Amino acid sequence: MTYDFLIIGGGIAGTSAGARLSHLGSTLLLEAETSLAYHASGRSAALFESQYGLPATVQLNLASRDYHMTANGGVLSPRGLMFLAGPGEEEVLAQDTADMGLHPISIDEAMAMVPALNRDHLRGAAHHEDAWDLDTDLLIGNFVKEMRGNGGTVKTGKRVEAITRTDGIWQVSVGGETYEARQLVNAAGAWVDIIAGMAGVQPIGISPLRRSMARMPAPGGYDPAGWPMLIGAGETWYAKPDAGMWIVSPAEQDPVDEPHDAWADDMVLAEGIARYQPFVTEEVTRVETTWAGLRSFAPDRTLVLGRDLREPDFIWCAGQGGYGFQTAPAASQLLADVVAGRTPELDADTVAALSPARFG
């Protein structure tokens, strides 16, 4: 069988693209791992904050909001977001407040929301109520269900070994099998440039950057379920409730030589916990688990969505960085609009800012 679309990658990029494209033709999704959302998509902080990101990303966030709120019953639940400044960080907090559309709050108000905070260390706080936990498993499940409902096929444990093209048809080789498609969708996360090279397409220069996390008991023995996500001024660390526990990240963005199954760097994690530590009253004495993921960015740190400039039947769905889940509804809709030749709902400047054509 020759599919209309063959999608490489089963994270949030690939599953959302598969859902949208399945309305346009026969669709096959191949995922290298034995389960979907194994890499970056399975290791996300899972927050929807519409003002987070560069201008084109914010437009995707805003265009995705209604879908997240309502489609299939919605995937969001209230969380809130609080930025905190320690000594000497007041100006950085002021910039974060302006950039993110936060509103300043008093130390007393911050303490009322998160009683484990260390009043003596705090020099400022800002809050945004309009930030939401995002059920990543449910969102991916909804997209997969939509794709399969339209006759699409999902295959896991299918690591691509070679890509060729003959008479306008892509041939993708996997473990002695060959799958054919008229159009190839590159949604392979940190591996997108490798897939492009295999297909004979010019790589964009996607950079995989590691981010580490640690899960631990909440400070002070509190139940953190109702607390907002906390972020250090300048995004030097963050902390967030997670299933009765507490996750802390150094918020690092360290380049890696090549994409791989990432793991946390113990030294980087320790440094991040040390930056977080003065903001709470209880010392971190126990870490339950650690992990890391690779956030993949284009050179301009904006998503790459659409047809390759030189090879139009090669479609990019890449460079999601840390914004893959919150942008997925609008990003995948834009991809489908471009493929179908429809006028996108997003404004022309945003579409141009996201297009692969910007790389020449």
Image (cartoon, rainbow, N blue to C red):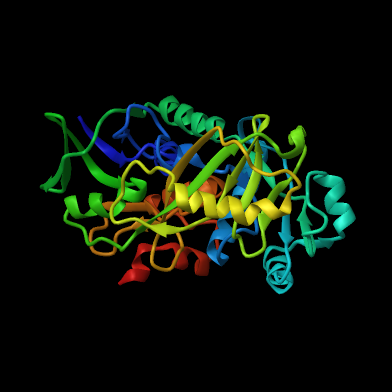
The outermost residue toward the bottom is 91
What residue appears at the point 60 percent right and 45 percent down from the top-left corner? 248
Q: Tag count in the figure?
A: 0
Residue 126 horizontal side relative to residue 267, left or right? right
Residue 200 horizontal side relative to residue 336, left or right? left
Q: Is residue 14 above or below residue 312?
A: above
How far from the left and from the top, in percent, is residue 325? 53, 45
Q: Quadrant of the rendered structure where residue 360 is?
A: bottom left
Residue 289 horizontal side relative to residue 73, left or right? left
Q: Is residue 323 above or below residue 298?
A: above
Question: Does residue 324 appear in the picture of this structure?
Answer: no
What residue appears at the point 51 percent right and 49 percent down from the top-left corner? 269
Q: Which sits in the foreground, 268 or 62?
A: 268
Q: Is residue 7 above or below residue 96?
A: above
What residue appears at the point 30 percent right and 63 percent down from the top-left corner? 204
What residue appears at the point 61 percent right and 36 percent down from the top-left corner? 216
How far from the left and from the top, in percent, is residue 213? 52, 44
Q: Quadrant of the rendered structure where residue 354 is?
A: bottom left
Q: Which sits in the foreground, 237 or 126?
A: 237
Quadrant position of the N terminus in the picture: top left
Question: Does residue 227 appear in the picture of this structure?
Answer: yes
The outermost residue toward the right is 108
How far from the left and from the top, in percent, is residue 187? 35, 46
Q: Which sits in the foreground, 343 or 233?
A: 233
